[in-house]
Image (tube, grey):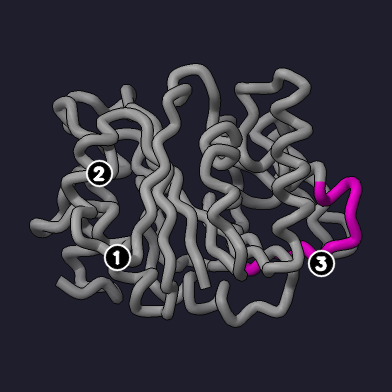
Amino acid sequence: MQAIIMAAGKGSRIEELTMGRPKSFLEINGKKLIEYNLDVLREIGVNKIIIVTGYRYDAFEELTKGMLDVVLIYNPFYEMVNVLGSFFMGMEELSEDFLYLHADTICDSSIFERLIKSESDITLPVEFKECDEEAMKICRENGKIVRITKQMPIDIAEGEFIGIAAFKKITIPVLKETAKSILAEGKFESYFEAAIQKMLDETDFKISAIDIGNTFWSEIDFEEDYQRAKRAIMSQLKYKN
């Protein structure tokens, strides 16, 4: 199994804490956020980890020096494109079942374990709850995901997609073409979820959600996110120091 990690952004909303470092280099108990993810991925059997960098790519080069299971891809256009553009830069490295995640999102390892056991073509972990405007929201019809977008009225949203997903090998050719077609239309500000939506609309792949309940996860966008993640990890969830 492979994994692709989005790590190109600058993280300007939390720069008072990052102080020029990549956001995923914030530390909890002496370990960088991205190191938590690297450790969990290796524990569940991922043998190739693709990290798409942009801002401070040199820091990632230094961090991963000597890591034979890591492939670094540099996105020189990271300030001009959104996450789908970064995925496009690294997608040619994908050739097996893979996990997709963001370098600044951490979660209990049980979420990854559930993902790799899923038999769906694409599996999305969702926290079913009331959502705010910033959440990547989903809604379903007859139990099937039909929409995934931030631009969804909160009164019809059923939950928040946490930004981590599992894809079977069979989906890769279509996913690559889908990402390419969206960017070819000049939609450089697209989130990765735009590709998922297009596949929901145009393919017969089985795309399912798993309900994570109250299982810990956090996308580190603001200082309060970082403090919450810090409390969770220091409370000795499943991360190992």
Residue at horizontal 64%, vertical 29%? 190
Checking the image for residue 68, the label placed there is 1
Q: Is residue 132 above or below residue 71?
A: above
Q: Nearer the viewer, residue 178 or 115?
A: 178
- From the image, state whether disc 2 or disc 1 is nearer to you: 1
* Residue type beneath disc 2: Phe
Check if mark 2's residue and mark 1's residue have beta carbons within 8 Å: no
Q: Which of the two discs, 1 and 3, labels the residue nearer the N terminus?
A: 1
Q: Nearer the viewer, residue 128 or 193?
A: 193
Q: Is residue 151 above or below residue 165?
A: above
* Residue type beneath disc 1: Leu
The alpha-carbon separation of the residues under discs 1 and 3 comes to 33 Å
Residue at horizontal 78%, vertical 52%? 174
Q: Which of the two discs, 2 and 1, labels the residue nearer the N terminus?
A: 2
Name the residue that disc number 3 marks: 206
Rate crowding at label 1 as few (under 14), some (14 to 19) or many (20 or more) other CA atoms within 10 Å: few
* Residue type beneath disc 3: Lys
The alpha-carbon separation of the residues under discs 2 and 3 comes to 35 Å
Residue at horizontal 81%, vertical 67%? 206
Rate crowding at label 3 as few (under 14), some (14 to 19) or many (20 or more) other CA atoms within 10 Å: some
Magenta residues (range): 199-210
Checking the image for residue 60, the label placed there is 2
